[in-house]
Image (spheres, rainbow, N blue to C red):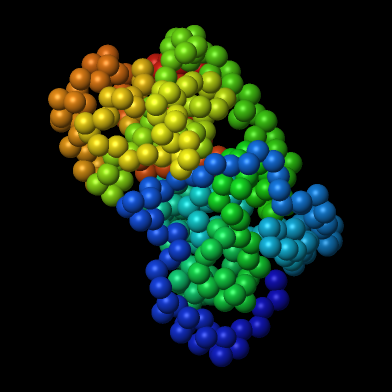
Amino acid sequence: MKKIWPVILFMTLLLAACGSGSSEEVKPSQPAGAGEAAATDSTGNGGNEAQGGGSGQEGETFVYQSESGPVQVPVNPQRVVVLTRFLTGNVMLLGVPLVGVDEMSKDNPNFAEQLKDVETVSDENLEKILALDPDLIIGLDGSNNLDKLKEIAPTVMYTYGKLDYLQQHIEIGKLLNKEEEARAWTEDFTARTKEAGQKIRAVTGENATVSVIETFGRQLYVYGYNFGRGTELLYGDLGLKLPEKAAEATKADGYMALSTEVLPEYMGDYIVFSKDEREDNSFQDTMVYKSVEAVKNNRVFIADAKTFYFNDPLSLEFQLQFFIDHFLGAGAP
């Protein structure tokens, strides 16, 4: 895409980089995760029209109908920057080249090999993003320096949780001119998840309950539906259930902070512990925790939190296999 960068623009961006911290910073009182999502495509992208042939030659563009209005984007992007950890896996699965991603994406062990040559950036690293010469920037609504980012490359922002995880992947597919591939994955993944759910419930029973817990910022949390950490799968197409008290407690925000003393009241027949070794996990040493039935019955499945936070397609693939291995045994089909 044609770009002319006068010295004055570079200096403007350089000065703008001295602002406040990244808008994706997560405060300890509010754990990283997902809000309640709508199940329909609300961006109205049926009107996207390619400007040029379907071969996607360099320089061709089309109008993508984003949440904030039409954006002229490349038909065949080759240098994408993703500023949110929640969408990196979507771009990776669709095979579109990345040149910059956020720190937490780089920190994900499942992404390490594919992102080894990709730079770490944020919405405050304007001069670094400029130097990467991106042809498309993707992020979340509320990102800092949005006007400056738009001067660097076509920029598309999404509202987190506005679409469910399947519709969000289709939306990214539309943006990257890979809608067919995105839809194929969602259909296949849904079928595989439902099949796995039937096998798992045959072992656990149809009414088995599962609690998902994590320590974040020295606080213990229990999570509800659609808050990452495998909750979309467990309480969705796998067909497992939240304990009644946990379901009620997480209905409003998707999560609830717990004290160790009340932990047993929110625990199900099984526990999935999204564990970050850097956090304070001393609750595991308490008699209260050890008295929980799932703990006594060896029904606690421990996952690496770095691989479990998110609900992008690559993370979901990992989570699905994790649940198959732990509910059915490693090596289960």
Say which quadrant the N terminus sits in.
bottom right
Q: In the image, what residue occupies the spot 20% across and 20% down?
A: 291
The foreground one among 239 and 255 is 255
Tell me if 325 is positioned left or right of 151 in this view.
Answer: left
Q: Position of residue 82 (x, y in %)?
A: 54, 58
Front residue of this view, candidates 189 and 132: 189
Q: Is residue 114 left or right of residue 294?
A: right
Q: Residue placed at 71% from the left, 48% from the top?
A: 42
Can residue 32 be seen from the camera position used here?
yes
Above or below, 93 relative to 208:
below
Left or right: residue 244 versus residue 281 is: right
Q: Is residue 308 visible?
A: no
Name, please, the residue furthest toward the bottom: 8
- Which picture quadrant has residue 182? top right
Q: Looking at the picture, does residue 80 appear above or below residue 259?
A: below
Please tell me whether residue 306 is drawn above or below residue 96 in the rendered image: above
List x then y, in percent, for residue 54. 82, 53
Residue 41, given in percent of the width and then of the height, sits at 71, 44
Q: Residue at x 52, y 86 (%)?
A: 12
Residue 63 in picture, x, y percent from top left: 78, 62
Judging depth in this view, the residue of 96 and 317 nearest the camera is 317
State the residue at coordinates (45%, 63%): 23
